[in-house]
């Protein structure tokens, strides 16, 4: 059993993931999340018992390859429909709070 | 005088993102078009709606293979995509679909000129397919950032070079060559101003002779090749100044300010890049077959480097002439057509780089809008070669008529305009004698070594003959008479 690979989630990990996902967690929620995530990891921890030496990771559930799409324009959504679900918008644009110097 | 700056060596690697010239997006069917109304080229997939499934555009894979063939890259047979996770409003899915562990191409080289005009090969680390993000506009509104998702999902190829670039001029030349290549291949229009080609520069300095790299800064937001060069020049000086003052370089992302040619820190990285890459489960892997590669190889256009080499080694053109001819694909193709009709390669080159380009510039035209045909220009070249018209008459008088009357050849026009040169030796000798008799002081001048007088004599002769004297013959006659 590869016990060394078992991950333990602590509060600083939760805070970091929340920050990366731009989620706001208060003290209480963060602590609950630590418990929840560790419970989930514990659930899949069972898998660590299996010897996987020499087994390639399984990435895809089917053997299908080369599922291409021809370079043709279709399935466009109208501007009105595209904007319809946005919490804030104008006639042309989605509007979001201003965040400068944080783009990627 | 050597300065402290001379102690240091510049080390640059470039990451170039190029939008591929497909009709539809990388993983969805919405249009890949620049300049449309905001949020009109969108689909459920590029908007990041739940429950949607992307599919790979076959054309974008072809573009990558073509580039690989052109640069001698290895094309990987098994390729799968990855999610690069980050949170930002112009990336509605919350991740970019890219290639991480299995870039479609690795290795390969691009030939550039160095500072002293010698050849150098820059190694390409990798090239991979990914998608563009939407566009955020921060300065249109005082309170909100406006988001346009037309660009979200546009296919990109990112080409990463090894840190082998050693001067800002080399960086300039590398980008110029890469842009020329993708334009020849017709996979990207290479327009840095419109952002279809973008470059991030990883810049560091080290003491000459040092083998370890210095700490690098990544500089973004240069909207022209020239500005990449300027940013590198500024950044090199800045880093040396910091080190010389006893400081250390912080690894960071900086932005170029074109207005004053400086760079400034974009953000501190208290959270280092943590993109949590993992394989994209929604896209099945690609198996690139040898047949697919061979088929594309058969469709490859002539490349600038190949044409350049042919012009120099087979046609005997100068490096400079060959470079000017191959800078633009359309010009090179026009030349290729022209030399199907004439074997005077040098003259054909001079026509394009001289009178034809001058005509295009004066009329603000592109070579594609040039109405005269290669056959017509070849007929003018033949007429000059046969001594029937002068080169200047061909360029100044015949060319404008060829453009207007595309059914006529140069001989017809020369006859209509009465431009056929006189190669009647007696007639030219007569005129030449008259001129020399009228200018005894200039003749003395010439005989005293002022060979520039010949121009004056020839000018007179052309006036008297109505521009029709064969200049080669006339020069020989003057030289003979002035002995």
Image (tube, coloured by chain):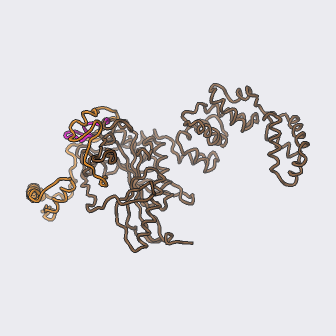
Chain colours: A orange, B brown
Is residue B42 inside the magenta stretch? yes
Asked whether the viewer can see residue B131, the reply is: no
B2 displayed left or right of A46: right
Is residue B430 inside the magenta stretch? no
Q: Position of residue B164 (x, y in %)?
A: 45, 61
Residue most extreme to the front = B142
Kindly identify the residue that appears in the image at 58 percent across and 38 percent down.
B336
Q: Is residue B324 above or below residue B400?
A: below
Front residue of B333/B199: it is B199
Q: Quadrant of the N terminus of chain B?
A: bottom right
Front residue of B269/A66: it is B269
Kindly identify the residue that appears in the image at 40 percent across and 40 percent down.
B21
B219 displayed left or right of B280: right
Front residue of B343/B413: it is B413
Q: Position of residue A37 (x, y in %)?
A: 11, 56
Give the dominant element type of the magenta stretch: helix, strand or loop: loop
Q: Position of residue B390 (x, y in %)?
A: 74, 37
Kindly identify the residue that appears in the image at 54 percent across and 34 percent down.
B368
Q: Position of residue A51 (x, y in %)?
A: 15, 59
Q: Is residue B326 above or below residue A40?
A: above
Asked whether the viewer can see residue B456, the reply is: yes
The stretch of residues the image draws in magenta is B40-53
Q: Is residue B25 above or below residue B222?
A: above
Q: Is residue B150 above or below residue A54?
A: above
Q: Quadrant of residue B354?
A: top right
Front residue of B413/B332: it is B413
Q: Quadrant of residue B360?
A: top right
Q: How many marks?
A: 0
């Amino acid at each position: 059993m590869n016990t060394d690979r078992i991950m333990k989630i602590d509060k600083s990990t939760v805070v970091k993931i929340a920050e990366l996902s731009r989620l706001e967690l208060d003290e209480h929620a963060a602590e609950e999340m630590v418990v929840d995530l560790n419970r989930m990891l514990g659930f899949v921890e069972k898998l660590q018992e299996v010897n996987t030496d020499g087994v390639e990771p399984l990435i895809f559930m089917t053997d299908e390859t080369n599922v291409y799409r021809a370079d043709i324009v279709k399935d466009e959504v109208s501007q009105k429909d595209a904007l319809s679900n946005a919490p804030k918008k104008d006639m042309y644009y989605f509007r979001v709070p201003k965040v400068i110097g944080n783009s990627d | 005088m050597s300065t402290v700056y001379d102690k240091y060596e510049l080390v640059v690697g470039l990451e170039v993102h190029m939008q591929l010239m497909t009709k539809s997006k990388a993983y969805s069917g919405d249009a890949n078009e620049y300049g449309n109304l905001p949020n009109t080229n969108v689909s459920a997939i590029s908007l990041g709606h739940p429950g949607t499934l992307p599919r790979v555009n076959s054309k974008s894979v072809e573009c990558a293979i073509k580039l690989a063939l052109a640069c001698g890259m290895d094309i990987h047979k098994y390729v799968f995509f990855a999610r690069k996770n980050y949170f930002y409003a112009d990336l509605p899915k919350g991740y970019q679909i890219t290639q991480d562990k299995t870039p479609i191409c690795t290795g390969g080289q691009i030939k550039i000129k160095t500072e002293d005009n010698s050849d150098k090969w820059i190694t390409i680390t990798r090239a991979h397919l990914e998608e563009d993000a939407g566009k955020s506009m921060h300065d249109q509104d005082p309170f909100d950032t406006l988001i346009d998702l037309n660009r979200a999902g546009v296919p990109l190829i990112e080409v990463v070079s090894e840190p082998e670039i050693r001067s800002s001029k080399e960086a300039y030349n590398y980008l110029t060559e890469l842009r020329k290549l993708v334009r020849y291949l017709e996979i990207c229009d290479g327009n840095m101003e419109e952002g279809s080609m973008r470059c991030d520069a990883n810049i560091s300095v080290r003491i000459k002779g040092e083998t370890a790299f210095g700490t690098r800064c990544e500089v973004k937001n240069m909207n022209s090749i020239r500005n990449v060069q300027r940013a590198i020049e500024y950044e090199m000086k800045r880093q040396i100044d910091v080190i010389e003052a006893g400081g250390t370089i912080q690894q960071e992302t900086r932005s170029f300010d074109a207005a004053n040619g400086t760079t400034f820190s974009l953000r501190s990285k208290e959270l280092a890049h943590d993109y949590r890459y993992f394989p994209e489960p929604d896209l099945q892997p690609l198996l690139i077959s040898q047949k697919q590669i061979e088929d594309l190889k058969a469709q490859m256009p002539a490349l600038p480097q190949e044409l350049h080499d042919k012009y120099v080694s087979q046609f005997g053109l100068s490096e400079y002439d060959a470079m000017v001819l191959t800078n633009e694909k359309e010009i090179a193709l026009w030349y290729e057509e022209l030399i199907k009709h004439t074997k005077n390669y040098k003259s054909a080159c001079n026509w394009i780089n001289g009178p034809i380009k001058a005509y295009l510039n004066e009329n603000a035209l592109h070579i594609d809008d040039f109405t005269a045909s290669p056959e017509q220009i070849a007929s003018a070249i033949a007429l000059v070669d046969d001594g029937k018209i002068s080169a200047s008459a061909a360029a100044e008088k015949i060319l404008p008529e060829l453009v207007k009357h595309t059914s006529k050849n140069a001989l017809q026009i020369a006859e209509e305009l009465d431009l056929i040169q006189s190669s009647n030796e007696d007639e030219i000798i007569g005129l030449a004698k008259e001129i020399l008799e009228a200018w005894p002081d200039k003749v003395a001048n010439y005989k005293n070594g002022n060979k520039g007088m010949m121009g004056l004599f020839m000018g007179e002769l052309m006036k008297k003959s109505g521009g029709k004297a064969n200049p080669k013959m006339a020069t020989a006659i003057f030289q003979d008479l002035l002995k």
